[in-house]
Image (cartoon, grey):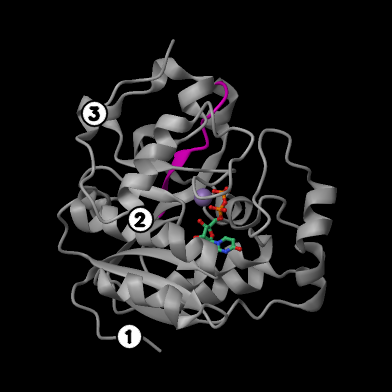
Amino acid sequence: MASGPAGSRRAYVTLVTNSDYALGARALVRSIRLSGTDADVVVLITGVVDVVDMAPLMALGARLVKVDLLPTSDAFNAAHGRARLHGNAPFTKGEKPAFHTPLDNFAKLRLWQLEEYEAVVFIDADALVLKNCDRLFDYPEFSAAPNVYESLSDFHRMNSGVFTARPSVATFERMLSELDAPGAFWRRTDQTFLQHFFPDWHGLPVFDNMLQYVWSNMPALWDWASIGILHFQYEKPWQDPHPKAAELAPLIALWEAFAGDGPVPEIAALPGPEQ
Ligand code: UDP
Ligand code: MN
């Protein structure tokens, strides 16, 4: 069920399963609109999201598509429940907010059902598009940036907060059967699964999914003029002061500018991190 017909063969897609991520999506959708694209902006929404959370997204011209969480088995759901997943695969680098439900992440895979689109760029709801990224629609399936925020070894892994895809129900069906195989445990949820499903993933530049921790951990890599998409992995900028809020204050201020209705700064003119 969609709020209206597709207006383009290309779409930026994000996912919202609760009010907190709807806040993130509003800032993201506004940033995509400000980047000057003709592509559709689609928000996949699960049934628990309230109309008061949806209205601001519609006001910005987003196309809302209602989806269900994936029809995964009880065993799968238990293995990927928040407490069990955090217990079996603890996060040591940063913290996930209380409103983050790991099982919900897998609903991203629903974008492969959007066959009305030829090409899709998925972007997590905790990200901002800082300049036009339409060239990504011409990149092959499956392209994603490396999960870089600490050291060189990070280049072995991809981050699933930004990726390119070609919707296909046939692909979606194949994904479902591999995803929920007996005993399956995807320690970093959709990210681990997608890296497994697309072992030959194409690498996007790190600037197409610049992770917020790079600001503090790898300041030499930071370059405002190069960043296409800024991604607030782990703690979210709209959380009540979180443990890293002080060191990430300039990034949080930027997110707040996009989350509001006023002007946003000229990105290339922003001061970089202290080195
Ligand atoms: N998400 C959601 N509800 C949840 C968890 C995740 O809507 O409870 C969606 C949302 O689009 C979010 C993405 O899935 O941005 C991935 O989660 P998150 O960004 O919190 O993970 P991180 O980037 O910190 O690994
Ligand atoms: Mn994210």
In front: label 2 or label 3: 2
List the residue tagged with mark 3.
225
Q: Is label 1's Cβ within 8 Å of ligand 1?
A: no
Give the left or right position of residue 167, taking residue 153 as reference: left
List the residue tagged with mark 1.
3
Residue found at x 29% / y 28% = 224
Residue found at x 49% / y 73% = 110
List the residue tagged with mark 2.
28
The CA span between labels 2 and 3 is 19 Å
Residue farthest top in this picture: 275
13 w.r.t. 137: above or below: below
Image coordinates for residue 260, horizontal then vertical, percent:
32, 54
User: At label 2, which amino acid type do we have?
Assistant: Leu
221 w.r.t. 90: above or below: above
Residue range corresponding to the magenta coloring: 142-151
Residue 261 among those drawn in magenta: no
Q: Do tag 1 and tag 3 residues touch (Cβ < 8 Å)?
A: no
User: At label 3, which amino acid type do we have?
Assistant: Ala
Dot 3, crowdedness within 10 Å: few (<14), some or many (≥20)?
Answer: some
Residue placed most toward the observer, 22 or 75: 22
User: At label 1, which amino acid type do we have?
Assistant: Ser
> N-terminal of the two: label 2 or label 3?
2
Residue 23, can we see it? yes
Residue found at x 61% / y 73% = 176
Residue farthest bottom in this picture: 1
> N-terminal of the two: label 1 or label 2?
1
User: Which part of the image, by quadrant, shows the N terminus?
Assistant: bottom left
Dot 1, crowdedness within 10 Å: few (<14), some or many (≥20)?
Answer: few
